[in-house]
Amino acid sequence: MKIDKITKTIIFFSFLLLFSAIASKYLSIKLWDYDFFWHLSTGKYIAENKALPEKDPFSFVNNLDENKDINPVRTGLVLKQYWLSQIVFYGIHKQFGDKGIIVLRSFILLTIIFLIAWWFKRQKVSVYIAYPLSFFVFIHTMAFTGERPVLFTMLFVVIVFLILEEFRQKKSRIIFSLIPIMLIWANLHGGFILGIFMISIFMGAETYNYIYRKDQAGRQRLLTLYIAGLAAVAVSALNPTGLSALSTLTSQNKLFQSGVQEYMSPFTLYREKIRPVDWEYILLIGLFPVLAVLRNKKINISHYVFLACLLYMSITALRFVIFYVCIGTMILGMELSYLLEPYFNKLEMRSSKFKLAASLLILISSATFAAGFIDVEKITFMKNVKGSVPKQAVDFIESNKIEGNIFNDMGFGGYLAWRLYPWKKTFIDTRQLNYTVTMESVWIQNAVESIQNKVLPEGKIPLWKRLLDHYEIDIV
């Protein structure tokens, strides 16, 4: 009993150290995401105008009649879908500056890992599995630290899974909390579609289970699930774009997604050495078929479908990998613990000191990790001015009152809008709202002389120069 008490204390301090180090690392990452600034600019626009933008307010070329919008559904989605996130970002930034956004981002990511670790404890998952898998999730979130509305989707995917699991295991009325959660989520980010899929899969799986059980109590439980689930799906349509987020899966959007890393398969990025291999993701992929065979029918059918769907999505597009990692870690960690529990118990029974030695090893791991990651001096709460923010260029334009139209790099567009709108408008930003303008931006940046001839005919003005002249560009 004494050893058990000691090991529990050691494990507690191990996780405390782990989470302290993770928080320190998150807080030390400077504000860097290109997209953040157009979200911030839109939040300011909404707050000041008390309305959502109908057209792009920040570009001087997107709304020209000559640049026809070939996908107005996508444009409406990008302009309006994130409005609540943008208001939150703007409100926090206005009150606390960059520090507030960095703290918000860190809090959301840390909460995700905390909820996963909490769920492991709730499911009595062995600490020998819960500890490394919690660390694996942290490693993978480091690739998703961008200050964007998708942070809310990462959090809500985990929360919805936890609510569905609580209902499945305890028949709790917490299932009705899905209604306000889906309403809020649908106005934060278009990823709420994942929530609809999860609820639908769970309802289908529980219906399948009921058909084979035929118990009267199950009927009432299923009715409760359908009432809460269908209501949650229905209220999610109460957002400015309804269910238009589904349109992001259509072929029209492939034009805008071409060449964008987050829409590419992670395996394509690994093969072309654009991105380092995410070994924790590869491990979870390998665990799925192994546990599916070893645990066979003992795995809940909804878990099978969740894993299969998220795995397929993650293989096709990098942006979905984080969702497979989060949900896969919880499901596969639980199943792995069930499988290995007898072996862990035997080891602990054979040697009373095994548990103590294992807990000390975990503590040493946490201490080593903390020693490398906890560095207060790196927590500066600043923008990444050396990489994603052209601060000095904008300072120069402002201080010298330089007039004229701007041609800018796509990544810098959001920051230019934040700093210069409404005095100046940009050429383009990472929203890529207009396909014609996006292509013209590429042609200018790559100094394309002609799209019809490999060699420009003598006496002809290069395409890139004609475009700069056409849009009366004065500043690059």
Image (cartoon, rainbow, N blue to C red):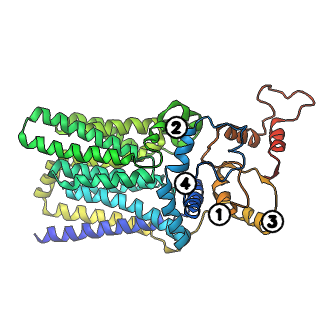
Q: Earlier in the sequence, mark 4 or mark 1?
A: 4
Vertical arrangement, residue 18 with respect to residue 267, above or below: below
Nearest to viewer (mark 3 / mark 4): 4
Label 2 crowding class (10 Å Cα cut-off): few <14, some 14-19, many 20+?
A: some
The residue that label 4 is drawn on is 52
Q: Earlier in the sequence, mark 2 or mark 1?
A: 2
The tally of labels here is: 4
Q: Earlier in the sequence, mark 3 or mark 2?
A: 2
Label 3 crowding class (10 Å Cα cut-off): few <14, some 14-19, many 20+?
A: few
Q: Are marks 4 and 1 in contact (CB under 8 Å)?
A: no
Q: Are marks 3 and 1 in contact (CB under 8 Å)?
A: no
Q: CA distance from mark 2 to mark 1?
A: 28 Å
Q: Earlier in the sequence, mark 3 or mark 1?
A: 1
Tag 2: amino acid: Met
Q: Earlier in the sequence, mark 3 or mark 4?
A: 4
- Label 3: element kind: loop
Q: Is residue 422 left or right of residue 308?
A: right
Q: Which mark is residue 401?
A: 3
Vertical arrangement, residue 131 with respect to residue 309, above or below: below
The residue that label 2 is drawn on is 264
**Residue 12 occupies quadrant:** bottom left
Label 4 crowding class (10 Å Cα cut-off): few <14, some 14-19, many 20+?
A: some
Q: Are marks 3 and 2 in contact (CB under 8 Å)?
A: no
Q: Residue furthest front?
A: 50
Nearest to viewer (mark 3 / mark 2): 3
Q: Are marks 2 and 1 in contact (CB under 8 Å)?
A: no
Q: CA distance from mark 3 to mark 2?
A: 41 Å
Give the quadrant of the N terminus: bottom left
- Label 2: element kind: loop
Q: CA distance from mark 3 to mark 4?
A: 30 Å
Q: Position of residue 217 (x, y in %)?
A: 8, 44
Nearest to viewer (mark 3 / mark 1): 3
